[in-house]
Image (cartoon, helix red, strand yellow):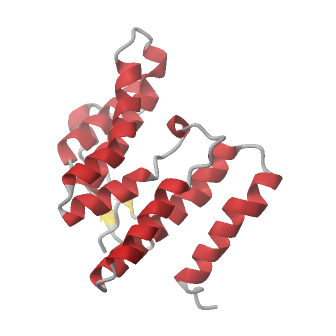
């Protein structure tokens, strides 16, 4: 069976996000991650395609859709910020001011728990640091965030060994990631 066209997949995900899935699950965080993250990736790719085709206005409409994915009843701190797709787009366009605006909420969410004395809330801060560095290709800070996540879990090897990991790309392209700073953005 051939894969459905991406527009059809996008239509199904939008319908699921807006109509069906909220009625069949009470765990909005899981729902959003599964549907919203994949929809964000599609919108990002569509914006890139439209930009290359010279239709900047249509590309911008997909960026607005990315920001609107987050349902109001779901606090942004609980999920992978979809604005990071928009930040990546702007960064690749050379508009680092707009990219910074999109990444700012995630960076602020990371700094707040790190500035208090409660060590129990630092894991989410490290994840937000990671999410706010990946769109900019900031491999040094992405690697540091991954090391801190690992240290928090006490499940990863020391920092030097964390650089030796391998992870298969989730885009089914066959690529194996060897650098944590690139993991979120398939280039193959």
Locate residue 16: give its quadrant. bottom right
Residue at the image point whose x is 58% and y is 86% from the top: 3
The answer to whether 135 appears left or right of 85 in the picture is: left
- Can you say whether 70 is above or below 145 in the image? below
- Most foreground residue, 185 or 72: 72
Locate residue 46: give its quadrant. bottom left
Quarter of the figure that contains the N terminus: bottom right
Residue at the image point whose x is 52% and y is 39% from the top: 76
- In this orientation, does residue 137 appear? no
The answer to whether 97 appears left or right of 156 in the picture is: left
Locate residue 125: give its quadrant. top left
Residue extending furthest top? Answer: 117
Residue extending furthest bottom? Answer: 2
Residue at the image point whose x is 23% and y is 64% from the top: 92
- Most foreground residue, 109 or 53: 53
- Can you say whether 170 is above or below 164 in the image? below
Q: Position of residue 142 (x, y in %)?
A: 27, 43
- In this orientation, does residue 185 appear? yes
The answer to whether 62 appears left or right of 184 in the picture is: right
Residue extending furthest right? Answer: 24
Q: Position of residue 116 (x, y in %)?
A: 39, 12
Residue extending furthest front? Answer: 57
Residue at the image point whose x is 34% and y is 35% from the top: 107
- Can you say whether 78 is above or below 5 in the image? above
The answer to whether 183 appears left or right of 25 in the picture is: left
Q: Position of residue 12 (x, y in %)?
A: 67, 73
Number of numbered markers: 0
Quarter of the figure that contains the C terminus: bottom left
């Amino acid at each position: 069976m051939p894969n459905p066209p991406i527009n059809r997949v996008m239509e199904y995900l939008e319908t699921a996000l807006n109509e069906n899935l909220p009625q069949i699950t009470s765990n909005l965080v899981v729902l959003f991650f599964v549907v919203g993250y994949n929809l964000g990736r599609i919108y990002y790719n569509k914006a890139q395609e439209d930009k290359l085709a010279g239709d900047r206005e249509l590309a911008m409409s997909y960026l607005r859709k990315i920001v609107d994915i987050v349902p109001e009843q779901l606090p942004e701190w609980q999920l992978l910020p979809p604005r990071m797709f928009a930040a990546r787009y702007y960064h690749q366009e050379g508009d680092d001011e707009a990219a910074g605006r999109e990444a700012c909420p995630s960076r602020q969410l990371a700094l707040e728990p790190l500035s208090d004395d409660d060590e129990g809330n630092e894991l989410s801060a490290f994840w937000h640091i990671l999410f706010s560095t990946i769109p900019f290709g900031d491999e040094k800070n992405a690697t540091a965030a991954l090391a801190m996540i690992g240290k928090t879990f006490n499940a990863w090897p020391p920092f030097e060994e964390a650089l030796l990991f391998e992870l298969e790309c989730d885009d089914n392209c066959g690529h194996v990631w060897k650098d944590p700073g690139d993991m979120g953005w398939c280039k193959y």
